[in-house]
Amino acid sequence: MQAQDLIRHLRIPELDDLRQYVRSLPTNTLMGMGAFAAITTYWLATRPKALKPPCDLHMQSVEVQGSRYARRSILQHGDTYMTYYYKDAQTMYEFFLRGLRVSNNGPCLGSRKPGKPYKWLLYKEVADRAEFAGSALLHRGHSQTGDKYIGIFAQNRPEWTISELACYTYSLVAVPLYDTLGTEAISYIIDKATISTVICDIPDKARLILDCVSGRKHSITTIVIMGNFDRELTAQAQQKGIEVLSLKELEDSNSLRELMYNFFFLFFSTGSPKGAMLTHGNVVSNCSAFIKITEVSQEISTSVSFKMYCLTMYFLICKPLWINASAKLIYNGTLKIIDRKKHIFKLAQGEYIAPEKIENIYIRSDPVAQVFVHGDSLQACLVGVVVPDPDFLPRWVKKRGIEGSYTEMCKSKELKNAILEDIIRLGKEAGLKSFEQVRDIALHMEMFSVQNGLLTPTLKAKRTELRIHFREQIDQLYAKIKM
């Protein structure tokens, strides 16, 4: 009897019962149910479909015949490199001309101020400005076979791309400069490439160039500034035999029409920057690889132009490019970079940070034995972990009236603040910018070592392991800063 009652309670209602129930509902409830059903039906019909992968993700590359370690993408037919995708786009200048044609002179470079809509330069406007600027560089003595290196010292903006395009329109070579690694690195690059013209975005960077060449023999003859500048800067430059003019003046100076692509410097944890040549073929090959792997799943819009650099390292389809990284081949035929992929990182506001440069300055502090500087693209500032020097610390803290055992002192807020103050002082003396200084630190008693997995056998910091190891302290530091 109990089983029959249970079945009666669990039985599916008959259609007549369901109709009667629905009729009993208020009108607004019925309208809401209808609207919900309509929205659900629309979403199911129009929701984004999963992109079909261009190949079997469990077998993305195959071994090149006759080679023990080299592999190629499964998308490439045969073992030859893919050097281009479009026959009429085999250099970056030809790439740009193709964009001009297929977009029908559409929007090319866009920029905006905070809270404002994008303002666009059309392809033809960009082409004309680049042609005028490049032609002026030729008439100032630059040439493909002679003085071909042009320094570009600027943040990302339309004028950066116009300046770069001006270079490869006339087979000149763009050499990017960055202030992140200090004046010594900039001076080294200028001297190594014998750069005579530098294009800057703001007057402060032009002044930094003047500081780099002050009081010594140098190759700089011209500084071009993308924005406005004052007469004082012009006078300072003239004293050093350097002419200063605006990018607009350069573009307007003439409009006559008259193949290395780029020469960039790699930065290591020690020593001077190392120059590396990036050819048009390298970039075109990588862009072509990107187009190849996305052709079956994603149509690239021709209404917006964007630069694709060497970001797609597929076996490498692409011509081989050396990268400073430790990597291993995983089971499905793809390359996984496992260490030192990118020591230079970007903060939330867009500033690039070279942590090892900062650490090499902070380590000069007497009470500091080791230091780890951390930041990422979701945070606006840097934090650090410091290991105090157990041998030097007692004498250093005695002068500041701090007492206790090593363990007690490492837990002391007073000691932390004293060390933070000292490393900030050293940073200012070394010319670190405010965004390159740590906002707060945590003290740690155990030295980084090979044994605890925080250093490599050559005693270099294993940044990924350090970040994981100190994740709790890092999160606590950022939480206090936000408060």
Image (spheres, grey):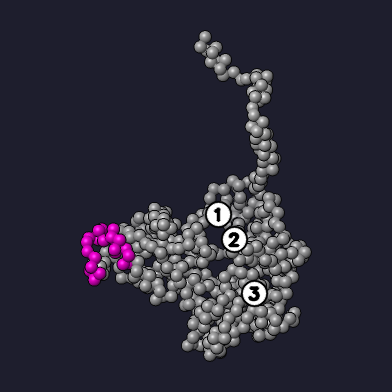
- Side of 310 relative to 425 (left or right): right
Instruction: Determine if residue 66 is in view.
Output: no
Q: Secondary structure at mark 1?
A: strand
Q: Earlier in the sequence, mark 1 or mark 3?
A: 3
Q: Give above or below for 389 relative to 70.
A: below
Q: Residue 330: give x, y in percent of width and height.
A: 53, 50
- Side of 286 relative to 206 (left or right): right
Quarter of the view holding residue 471: bottom left
| 9, 337: nearer the viewer | 9
Judge depth for marks 3 and 2 and give the one in front: 3
- Side of 34 relative to 412 (left or right): right
Residue name at image x 44 percent, y 72 percent: 432
The magenta span reads: 398-419
| 355, 333: nearer the viewer | 355
Q: Give above or below for 25 relative to 177.
A: above
* Residue for badge 3: 163
* Residue for badge 2: 311
Residue type at tag 1 = Leu
Judge depth for marks 2 and 1 and give the one in front: 2
Q: Is residue 347 magenta?
A: no
The reply to whether the C-beta atoms of the residues labelled 2 and 1 are less than 8 Å apart is: no
Q: Earlier in the sequence, mark 3 or mark 2?
A: 3
Judge depth for marks 1 and 3 and give the one in front: 3
Q: Earlier in the sequence, mark 2 or mark 1?
A: 2
* Residue for badge 1: 335
Q: Residue 269: give x, y in percent of width and height.
A: 45, 68
Residue name at image x 35 percent, y 60 percent: 442
Residue type at tag 2 = Leu
Q: Secondary structure at mark 2?
A: loop
Q: Is residue 417 magenta?
A: yes
Residue name at image x 49 percent, y 56 percent: 338
Q: Residues within 10 Å of mark 3 (few under 14, many from 20)?
A: many
